[in-house]
Amino acid sequence: MRIEARDPRQRYWVQSTKRELEGKLGTTFSLSNGMLGLRGAHEECPDWGRPEFYVAGTYATGPASLLGFHDPDHILTHPQRMTPQALEAATDNSIQTLPNLPFPIALTIDVDGQRFAFDTHKVLSAERLLEIDGARMRRTLVFRDDDARRTRIDSQRFVSMADPHLICLRADLRRLNHEAPVALNGTLHETVANTNDVPLWTPGARIATDSLRGIECITAGSNISIALVQCQRVINRGDNIAIELFAIAGTMSLAEAQRQAEAACERGFAACAFDHQAAYEQLRRETRVEFDGNPSTVQGFNFGQMHMHMALSPIAEQTGIPIKGLTGHGYRFLTFWDMDFHMFPYYLLTQPHRARKLLEYRYNQLPLYRANAKRWGAQGAQVPWETNTRGEEETAPWLCLQEREIHISADAAHMFMRYAAITGDESVIRDMGAEFAFETARFYASRLTWDAARERYELPDIGCPDQYHTFADNNVFISLMAQWNLAYAAGLFAQTDYAPIADRIGVNSEEAATWRSMAEQLFIHETNADGIVEQNDGFFELDRDLGGICETYCSHSQAVKQPDVLAAFIPFEARYPREIRRKNWHYYNARTLHGSSLSLPGMAYAAARCGLNDEALYNLHASCRMDLDDVNLDTERGVHVSGGAVEWYTVVHGFGGLDVTSEGLALRPNLPRQWSRLAFRVHWHHQPVDIEITREGVEVSVGTDQPCAVPVRIGDGAWVEIEAGGNIKEKTL
Ligand code: IFM
């Protein structure tokens, strides 16, 4: 027998029968292809096993009182400050989430007519292994019955990257010390519910044959019909007893799901697994990142990359990217700024074709964003802080963020500009981006106030991304984003190409001129005498004593959830010299509680970009371990997917020293002293570019997917055009 060592960088293994860990393990072993999301629950679905299965975009409506807006996500609430508009939203039927559907690859195991159950048998071993490089989970279960018979099941499962509706499982059974008759069977485990035991679907039609079972699930409130069909093939040859399950799920007819399940079954597990593996390998090639850091950092990093791959749905133009992908019910599968500001730039550089879907998602919802602005007494289009396929604001009203967390409108508009710059495809601005940016500029224009005494515009009454300070004025990050949006829209208006769009939605030169002067006169906090940027008005005067601070008792102090000033350095780095960025990093590091999962990777990125490499590595490591080690004790609610994107920036932009602009790729490598190699692939104008950085030098190789050359600059050197298929090498910088 061949013995293979487990590579900890690509394998994550847990042996546990502790019930209290099932929530966390269900998340860390979850698999998805963006369309279907399957948690890592045991196939026998014990009551405490948290079997959960979700289908993208199939939101059900449930009573707010039962579901809770967020479960305990946010503890910093302000019910006394809710506006009447916000209260209106807290009606009984305003809550949406994805229903937890029947577990599609459930299994029954009988030994001598006795059904195995975790509660009635002695479980000797329960191991789960995640193959990160294969997006596949393996499980080994050994149990003993009352007659001391020991039986072992080895299963493997994947959610197909080749077929968006397919999930496969193969389980092999071995009798370890007996020859009793055994039976393996597939089943659809229907005793499932959402948070607080609320069921969010009802059964419709059913089908069943000896080898196949199917059910139509009708979502509560929204009446979406989801077909779920499982087809099985049992292999029973002497000692070789195995079962293969093929589950098809989606918004299709039961007959169609049956046809697809039978076709998969006909092909068999090995063939379906081959297709899945080939598709996933292709994706990994296009998005390759390798570095020789601490294996546990690399493991967490690779885990984060796998979830970035699994989160992007084939129908992302309808669904966007739910913040925890389809890995858990936390945040009710809503989209936040994580998608626009954090995830999108990652997809843009790694899978630009798919990234475009996120632009379509925002643009498709533009009419709803216009209505949202009106609701808050603003003009133009206001992107809801949290939303889903229906494009409405879904944020819990008692957070008071709906009308205040307004940077998300500019975060979304920024995506269109970046897409055009990096792909060279201006059609997105003509087709979507100009209209979007005009409407979001209108929105900011309606939110600014003129301070006649100081002769400047201000942006009052906003909620900082650092949600420990929800009632603030002139937050530097938000004001910079608003300023960018106003100036960008005024710039587009000045280009004749976009005149028909401006005409269509009634933007005239007077309005565009107002945007320009607002951008020019908008107050932005500059650095003080010590080089520190004040996050928002009055921040420096807040209490510096952080003793006894906790999430519910901190808004009077300088404690921040995540540092907004450092977030502002991402798009606006050029404004701030490196020394200033370093000073601010230290200042805000001392005040950051990391209440948000975006905080650690953000700190890592900001540190790496100003050469604080040890600090960057420390934060990168902690961020990469966020879910695998349950750093914030909330992994059971789903994977913190967007952390994976910011970890990628830390490695590629921070340590790789890569800047990607419309001019081309500029590289100023900054390898941590602990690493000897970093290699990655990015795309510019849809052309793949491979970059390899070692202690000896840098090599840049341009692919041949497109005929175009790629301009590259290394260090302070000149720009060089590298032809398709060409490469350059530079010795140590
Ligand atoms: O978008 C973030 C936010 O910044 C802080 N709360 C969690 C959200 C989802 O990751």
Image: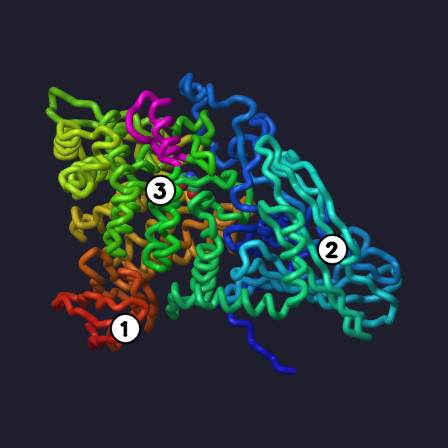
Provide the secondary structure element on which disc 3 rests: loop
Question: Which residue does the numbered mark 3 point to in the structure image?
Answer: 562
Amino acid type indicated by mark 2: Leu
Q: Position of residue 701 (x, y in %)?
A: 27, 73
Q: Is residue 475 visible?
A: no
- Residue 193 location, quadrant: top right
In this rendering, is residue 625 above or below 535?
A: below
For ligand 1, tell me if the residue under mark 3 lies within 8 Å.
yes
- What's the residue at 72%, 49% (across, down)? 46
Magenta stretch encompasses residue 366: yes
Q: Are marks 1 and 2 in contact (CB under 8 Å)?
A: no
Q: Position of residue 605 (x, y in %)?
A: 31, 54
The residue furthest top is 84
Q: Nearer the viewer, residue 486 or 370?
A: 370
The residue furthest bottom is 1
Question: Which residue does the numbered mark 1 point to in the structure image?
Answer: 701
Per the rendered image, the range of residues in magenta is: 365-385
